[in-house]
Amino acid sequence: MKIEISIPIVLRRVKVIGPLGAREIDVILDTGAANTTIAWDVAKDIGYDPAVSERRIRVITANGVIEAPLLTVEAIELEELRTERVDVICHDIPEIVGIEGLLGLSFLKHFRTVIDFTTGVLEITGES
C-alpha cells in the first residue's frame, strides 16, 4: 500500500473490528505511540465497554498523564493490510476534528513501514 502524505499523516477509512461489527475511522499515523488509540464511541460501537475494562495503562497526553482503558480488538484493517488481536487504548482525540484515533506501533509492528518525506510517500507492506 502506497499513499501520498502530508503533515499530519492522516489515514482514511481504517477499519476497527470487534465482536459487534466494524467501524471505519480516520486516524493519524503516530510512530511514537506504543499502542493504537481509538475513541470511546468507536470502542462502544464495535462491542466493547471501556469503562469496565480491567486493563489500564498510563498515557502521556498534551494535557498530562492519564490512565486509559486498554482493550484488545479483534482486528484492524488498512486497505489490504490486516492484523488480528491488536491492543488499543481508548481515549478521545480532542485536538483534531474528525480524527477518531492514532495508528501506533501495536498495528505497525506487523508490517514494513517506510515514510519517505522527500517523495511524500508512505509505504506499508507485508502480512501479519
Image (cartoon, helix red, strand yellow):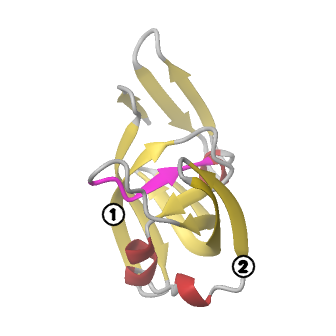
Q: Can you name the residue that lies furthest to the front here? A: 63
- What percent of the width, then of the height, locates residue 21? 39, 81
Q: Nearer the viewer, mark 2 or mark 1?
A: 2
Disc 1 designates what residue? 24
Residue 102 included in the magenta stretch of the image? yes
Q: Quadrant of residue 67?
A: bottom right
Above or below, 70 relative to 103: below
- What percent of the width, then of the height, locates residue 18? 49, 79
Say which element carries label 2.
loop
- What percent of the width, then of the height, locates residue 82? 53, 57
Q: Can you name the residue that lies furthest to the top here? A: 118
- What percent of the width, then of the height, locates residue 26? 34, 53
Q: Amino acid type of disc 2? A: Arg
Inter-mark Cα distance, 2 to 1: 24 Å
Above or below, 24 relative to 32: below
Disc 2 designates what residue? 55
Q: Amino acid type of disc 1? A: Glu
Tell me if 71 is positioned left or right of 19 in this view: right
Q: Can you name the residue that lies furthest to the left here? A: 98
Above or below, 84 relative to 106: below
Read off the magenta span: 98-104
Q: Residue at 27%, 54% (x, y): give it.
A: 98
Above or below, 23 relative to 35: below
Residue 42 included in the magenta stretch of the image? no
Q: Residues within 10 Å of mark 2 (few under 14, many from 20)?
A: few
